[in-house]
Amino acid sequence: MHKAGIRDVAREAGVSISTVSRAFTKPQLVSQATRDRVMAAANKLDFNISRSAMALKSGQTYRVALLMSEGITSWFNAEVFAGIDDVMHGKGYDISLYQHINDAETRDRFFTVLPVLRNVDAVFVASFAIEPAEIEQLRRTKVPIVGINTPDPLRFDASETIDDEGGMYRAAQHMIKLGHKRIVYTCSAAAETLDASIDLRGHGFIRACERAQNTHDISWKVLTVPRGRDFADNALTAVLSEDRFPDAICCQMDMMAIPLMIKLARHGYRAPRDYSIIGFDDAPYADTVELTTMRQNPYEMGRNAAMKALTLLEGRALEQPHAILEPKLVLRGSDSRYEGE
Amino acid sequence: MHKAGIRDVAREAGVSISTVSRAFTKPQLVSQATRDRVMAAANKLDFNISRSAMALKSGQTYRVALLMSEGITSWFNAEVFAGIDDVMHGKGYDISLYQHINDAETRDRFFTVLPVLRNVDAVFVASFAIEPAEIEQLRRTKVPIVGINTPDPLRFDASETIDDEGGMYRAAQHMIKLGHKRIVYTCSAAAETLDASIDLRGHGFIRACERAQNTHDISWKVLTVPRGRDFADNALTAVLSEDRFPDAICCQMDMMAIPLMIKLARHGYRAPRDYSIIGFDDAPYADTVELTTMRQNPYEMGRNAAMKALTLLEGRALEQPHAILEPKLVLRGSDSRYEGE
DNA sequence: TTGAAAGCGATACCAC
DNA sequence: GTGGTATCGCTTTCAA
């Protein structure tokens, strides 16, 4: 039993294939009666328009690429993916995912296999520290490229970027305003070759501390631990190794802050009783452990990026191609002067 | 500047389009010299084989569908997706994602996407409580259908299924062996129309308790709370409302057990000092909070499902189409007789 | 409102 | 080892 094609339907309905095609793609151009007959036949034969043929004819691929440095199982990436997909799927686009483009080797491989990208209608680059030269290479594909939390966002056709530096600046400032005097910043080391967007957060912390140094008589320190699966334990060790336990911790990300809080509690240090801690992201369980944090919304970023890509795909220009989002301070219980929302 | 096509490359290289095609797909059939010339031309013109055309000609779509009841941002679904993608992406397949086939308009949506499914080479159904009649509908599409944690797995062409019932049976048994006498099972209510795979866990709990009831003099109870974002708080309330605080809690899933542990601690109840608790999944942070749990590996399930689909796609038969996986008891610190691994 | 026919960009069979 | 050509399934003028 061969899979029904458009001509089978045409025969069954007693019309031409042109009419079948129109009945599906431009129903208003077909008379009600004919359309009904076509649809009945199509239904009977389990027929549906071939997307491959549509794609070939239209010149579009109905596929977009999403490049990410880590895996899709991370909170940020899964949210971004969901945001993009929720916009694109309905418009008939699939997402072709390129994960783990982080180490030197995979990067090479990727840009060697780059040809694959010539088979997509748009490219999204998420949290991916890409070199200017590589962006140029991508641009040779002539398809819209939109960046999500990438450095050099202006090199893309559009971008959504979180203000990591400013966000952590405000986070540190919040701790300082609370009156804390011994502040540490815990973070995991940057990837070998790449300088991830997230590292800007460290700059924000330093800027806030340097600025307050004289006026507020604070001491501060950056505690960098190796990246990898044990970064939370390493951060714990680093914090506990300090001569005096800090009265405030700014944490590079919630995924580090949450285990840190939990493990510090086992050592007798409870927030906000013994110290204040602030995270960044508002990742899962931040609410559960009552972590004060700087919220960002990767799902929205994905949605916005996708809508921009769609506009570009339609050949229209973007009124606001580049957006910089400010993370929002979410007060929960982990900072000492918390007084309710 | 028009996008280079195969004929441009042919002209540039001074060969026919047949040769260009072969140079890409069957290099061994083309002489070294010719191939080099073709590749040079292709490179110069930024040319690459059109996947749409390949798809049309070959009759394949190079696209698979993944149906899931929840969103991709959930731990289980993201892991399954990653597993499938890691296998399929390299083989040239993209994943077309159908999320949230679960809410009120379940049926409508389901039958809306059905036609689109005729445009994929295979479909994966993940954690999706599908009716036998619906499976039959799917099978009319004539493509391999593989189930991942679905009821009635034998109705699919292949399946990967976790033994939810047996897993929770063993979890409850573990609590009973530890000597606990007042055991509760906390879970969120099943979805309205659909009876999710996860609900089998409740059956396992009940079976274990009924079996031990006489011999071990235990009392047990199922605490069902409404599904939705507050299920953890609701579970907390339910547990605290018991006349006597239970000495053991079996939790439907880690995502409920983890917040429950954290919140119970705020009420003065600490595991394993005041009670034992066991979860299911080994989800993120289960290790951090030292939750004893039944581990399952959705990433592996995704991989295995994808490899089975690939085999089917190649027209080969499966030696073992249906697999049932046993979750593994992972002892951590949340049960009272923990004595190290 | 409907039909005939020319492609879209590759593949593969058949010659040479 | 290489080239000509029919074909995949649909969309889209152009006529009728």
Image (cartoon, coloured by chain):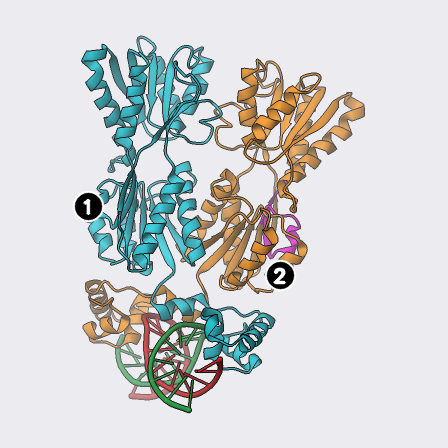
Chain colours: A cyan, B orange, C red, D green
Tag of residue A132: 1
Q: Nearer the viewer, residue B34 or A316?
A: A316
Q: Residues within 10 Å of mark 1 (few under 14, many from 20)?
A: few
Q: Amino acid at mark 1?
A: Pro
Q: Mark 2: which amino acid?
A: Gln
Q: What is the CA distance from the residue labelled 1 to the residue labelled 2? A: 50 Å
Name the spot of residue B96 as percent of width and height, x first. Answer: 46, 55
Q: Quadrant of residue B250?
A: top right
Subunit ID for the residue under disc 2: B
SS for callout 1 = helix
Q: Which residue does the image show at 55% across and 83% down from the upper left? A: A14
**Quadrant including the N terminus of chain B:** bottom left
Question: As drawn, which residue projects farthest toward the right?
Answer: B214
Q: Is residue B114 left or right of residue A180?
A: right
Count the marks: how many?
2
Looking at the rendered image, the quarter that the C terminus of chain B falls into is: top right
Q: Is residue B212 magenta?
A: no
Residue most extreme to the top: A244
Q: Secondary structure at mark 2?
A: helix
| Residue sitting nearer the eye, B144 or B318 | B144
Between A259 and A32, the one lying in front of the other is A32
Residue at x-position 45% and y-position 70%:
A26
> How far across and down, in percent of the image, does residue B284 sit?
48, 31
In the picture, measured across the screen, residue A63 lies left or right of residue A163, that is right
Q: In this image, B102 relative to B210: left or right?
A: left
- Where residue A56 sits, quadrant-wise, is bottom left
Q: Which residue is denoted by mark 2 in the rendering? A: B137
Q: Are marks 1 and 2 in contact (CB under 8 Å)?
A: no
Identify the magenta region. Answer: B148-163
- Marked residue chain, label 1: A
